[in-house]
Amino acid sequence: MNIVVLVKQVPDTYSERKLSSGDHTLDRDATDAVLDEIDERAVESALQLKEANEGSEVTVVAMGPDRTTDAIRKALSMGADKAVHLSDEALHGTDAIGTTIALATVIGTLEDVDLILAGNEASDGRTGAVPAMIAELLGLPALTHGRELTVEGSTVTVRRETDDGVTVLSAELPAVVSVNEKINEPRYPSFKGIMAAKKKPVTTLSLADAGIDAENVGLANAWTQVSEANPKPPKSGGEKVEDEGDGGSKIAAFLVGQKLI
Ligand SMILES: Cc1cc2nc3c(=O)[nH]c(=O)nc-3n(C[C@H](O)[C@H](O)[C@H](O)COP(=O)(O)OP(=O)(O)OC[C@H]3O[C@@H](n4cnc5c(N)ncnc54)[C@H](O)[C@@H]3O)c2cc1C
């Protein structure tokens, strides 16, 4: 089975995220960057399928600036076999539709892809739209929000979990599957895995190399633009209640004042 995993490098949750004052895109240099945790889970799913299906190969595909190679190396050190990195200055500010067109084009250059795995929602953009749109563009079934994933023969089955409940979906391969945070616990790369990752092939493609029309990507071609952005006000210290025997009444009065009770 040839499995493609889409991985995105995102700002570390623990570092402060900033938008560039000029075009309101993410100031990637202002933050630490990591492989998105949801995509680590997608990689883990791919590796489990590879281990259960001898002869399978896992290819990581990432779109992002030069330093995305760190996220790619992490996926390779977990056990993925090879990677394709789409990197081009012209991709700056690309929206979810442009991202979809770009990633679908790259996937189209790979041979005999059986399964495309992705996270259900990136922790920075959070549109939760890319996997389903890729399926639409490639004419493949989309099985999204998966919390369990099995492949038997040429059939993929996903337990799809949303706020409404659990649905079981099946489709014939090739297909696109996105996973949620309950799907698994991703493995830590071993020392051996980290050393092996240094030698695994990473193909870097420009837009021209991948055959992507520059008219479909970039800030100028995004279907929506961020016109204004304001950071959230910093959290205040809250109200401290000193208990002098009347603590309960003071808390109740505070909650009434906030219309919480
Ligand atoms: C500061 C900021 C401003 C933005 N402004 C706009 C805007 O004005 N208009 C607009 O439409 N969008 C905007 N976006 C969204 C941005 O375009 C998206 O981050 C990007 O296009 C992909 O969408 P997503 O991250 O929401 O993906 P999702 O659909 O949430 O991602 C789901 C999964 O798709 C895969 N995936 C997504 N992106 C990649 C990638 N680059 N490489 C590999 N796999 C990937 C991963 O597996 C991921 O887990 C903005 C984002 C930020 C951070």
Image: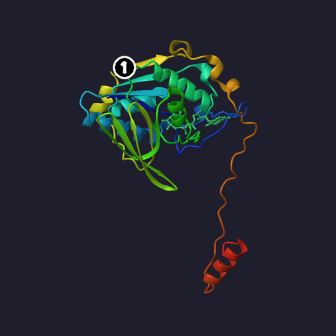
Vertical side of 257 occupied by 54: above or below:
above
Q: Residues within 10 Å of mark 1 (few under 14, many from 20)?
A: few
Name the one closer to the observer, 218 or 2.
2
Q: Name the quarter where the N terminus is drawn.
A: top left
Residue topped by disc 1: 201
Pick out the residue farthest to the top.
208
Residue under the image location 70 percent in, 33 percent down:
224
The reply, left or right, for residue 254 in relation to residue 112 is right
Q: Which structural element holds mark 1?
A: loop
Residue 112 position within the rendered picture, expressed as x and y whole percent measured from the top left: 37, 22
Identify the residue at horizontal 59%, vertical 32% (top origin). Answer: 28
Residue at the (53%, 16%) spot, across then down = 206
Q: Is residue 66 visible?
A: no
Give the left or right position of residue 126, taking residue 37 as reference: right
What amino acid is at disc 1? Pro
Q: What is the residue that sits farthest to the right in this orientation?
A: 227
Q: Tell me how many marks there are.
A: 1
